[in-house]
């Protein structure tokens, strides 16, 4: 088995130079089980990042893995242009839980592809080219999704179409953000097909708008025939205490994109729309691996597990407890922590000194806990664990974090 250093050397030799990894001394991860990861030396790590909100149901969940394995043995692949049962079963199942009257879906392979398709659909529906997005939003790595991404470090293409995209202010001040939306719409509403927004901005720093934010936003958009796209790639499938964040914000978007958690580690992406909007996607289009029977089976198993174990309610309850504990840490370490925010099991802790973030990540990893980092300046500790954790896990994380924060003084 390769060592961690040997893997790093091979990455340098065979991967593009932008392929990053966390930690100055990264572990070689070889196994996952539930809420834990294990390295090549047998050390266990409590995973409080879940592969950036992917394994909501835990690593190698046996109830999901068994069904996926059975499907692989039976039929591994046909294109969506052929008839298979799992794809229509998952589509029908999703129609029963998607917000409002959204019930038509296009399956693909990733969040980037889902958002790209959602944006294309908006153009086809409205006949308009432009888009409205928010500073702090991250929507993918295709040319189109990079163009609507509002985090400078991710906008790596030097030739993005900046003439057709307008960025509103981020969520930190809701009134200011909506005022900037209104100003953009007054000047360019006749050019804008859709507004794309993460209900909670993940990579932007776990930025959470107030509960009435999207109701007010939808009202502004409708005045100018601008569609609302909800990017629920990080927030979907129980993460915030609801199957979709739209339930919390009490708004039904025109188009919704999702990925990540629906596959629980199996490649998955999709965008769904209201019938009148979906009707615009009427020219030939397909995704070779979208609707793959293995991925579709995984999605069905994921939904079964979430519902069977009431993970939405669990996420809501544990998220409130976790936020309470983090705010105690904030109160005790005001000299280090700039702010705490969270909804469900998606929480962020802003650090006054961004340099502290990598130090904390490294020490938490050394202590057997995996967390993430994000934010406009990479100044936010990110906590997005599998939804199968318990209060003891939260207490452990907060205890370890407390010790590290104290050492920073």
Image: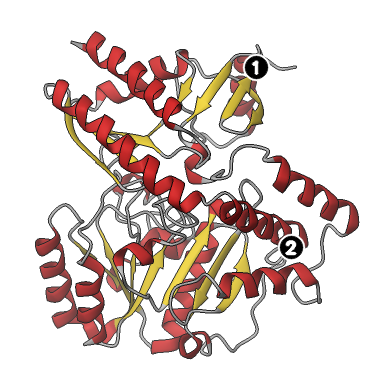
Residue 286 higher or lower than 6, as above or below: below
Q: Residue at x 51, y 49 (%)?
A: 311
Q: Secondary structure at mark 2?
A: loop
The reply to whether residue 275 is in sight is yes
Residue 263 position in % (x across, y down): 62, 53
Tell which circle, 2 or 1, labels the residue nearer the N-terminal end: 1
Residue 66 position in % (x across, y down): 78, 46
Q: Residue at x 42, y 30 (%)?
A: 391
Residue 292 numbered tag: 2
The residue lying toward the viewer, choosing from 176 and 392, is 392
Identify the residue under disc 1: 6
Residue 378 position in % (x across, y down): 30, 35
Q: CA distance from mark 2 to mark 1?
A: 34 Å
Callout 2–callout 1 Cβ contact below 8 Å: no
The residue lying toward the viewer, choosing from 286 and 335, is 335
Quadrant in which residue 134 is drawn = bottom left
Residue 200 position in % (x across, y down): 32, 54
Q: Residue at x 20, y 56 (%)?
A: 171
Task: Say whether residue 135 is left or right of residue 36.
Answer: left
Residue 367 higher or lower than 163, as above or below: above
Q: How many other residues sit within 10 Å of disc 2, few (<14), some (14-19) or many (≥20)? A: many
């Amino acid at each position: 088995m390769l060592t961690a250093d040997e893997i790093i050397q091979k990455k340098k030799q065979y991967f593009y130079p932008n392929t990053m990894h966390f930690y100055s001394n990264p572990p070689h991860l070889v196994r996952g089980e539930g809420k834990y990861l294990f390295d090549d030396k047998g050390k266990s790590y409590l995973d409080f990042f879940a592969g950036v909100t992917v394994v909501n149901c835990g690593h190698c969940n046996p109830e999901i893995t068994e069904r996926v394995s059975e499907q692989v043995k039976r039929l591994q692949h046909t294109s969506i242009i052929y008839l298979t049962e799992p794809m229509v079963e998952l589509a029908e199942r999703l129609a029963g839980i998607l917000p409002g009257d959204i019930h038509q879906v296009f399956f693909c392979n990733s969040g980037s592809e889902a958002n790209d398709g959602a944006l294309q659909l908006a153009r086809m529906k409205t006949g308009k080219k432009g888009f409205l997005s928010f500073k702090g939003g991250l929507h993918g790595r295709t040319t189109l999704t990079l163009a609507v991404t509002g985090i400078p470090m991710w906008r790596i293409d030097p030739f993005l179409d900046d003439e057709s995209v307008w960025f509103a202010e981020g969520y930190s001040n809701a009134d200011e953000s909506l005022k900037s939306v209104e100003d953009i719409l007054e000047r360019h509403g006749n050019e804008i097909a859709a507004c794309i927004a993460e209900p909670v901005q993940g990579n932007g720093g776990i930025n959470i708008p107030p509960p009435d934010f999207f109701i007010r936003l939808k009202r502004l958009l409708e005045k100018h025939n601008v569609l609302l796209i909800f990017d629920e790639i990080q927030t979907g499938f129980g993460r915030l205490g609801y199957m979709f964040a739209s339930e919390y914000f009490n708004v039904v978007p025109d188009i919704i994109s999702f990925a990540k958690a629906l596959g629980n580690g199996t490649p998955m992406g999709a965008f769904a729309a209201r019938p009148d909007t979906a009707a615009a996607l009427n020219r030939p289009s397909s995704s070779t691996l979208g609707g793959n029977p293995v991925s579709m089976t995984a999605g069905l198993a994921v939904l079964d597990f979430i519902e069977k174990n009431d993970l939405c309610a669990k996420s809501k309850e544990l998220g409130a407890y976790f936020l309470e504990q983090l705010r105690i840490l904030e109160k005790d370490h005001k000299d280090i922590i700039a702010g705490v925010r969270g909804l469900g099991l998606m929480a962020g802790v802003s650090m006054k000194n961004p340099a502290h973030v990598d130090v904390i990540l490294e020490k938490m990893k050394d202590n057997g806990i995996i967390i993430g980092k994000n934010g406009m300046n990479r100044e936010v500790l990110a906590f997005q664990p599998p939804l199968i954790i318990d209060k003891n896990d939260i207490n452990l994380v907060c205890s370890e974090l407390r010790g590290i924060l104290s050492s920073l003084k």
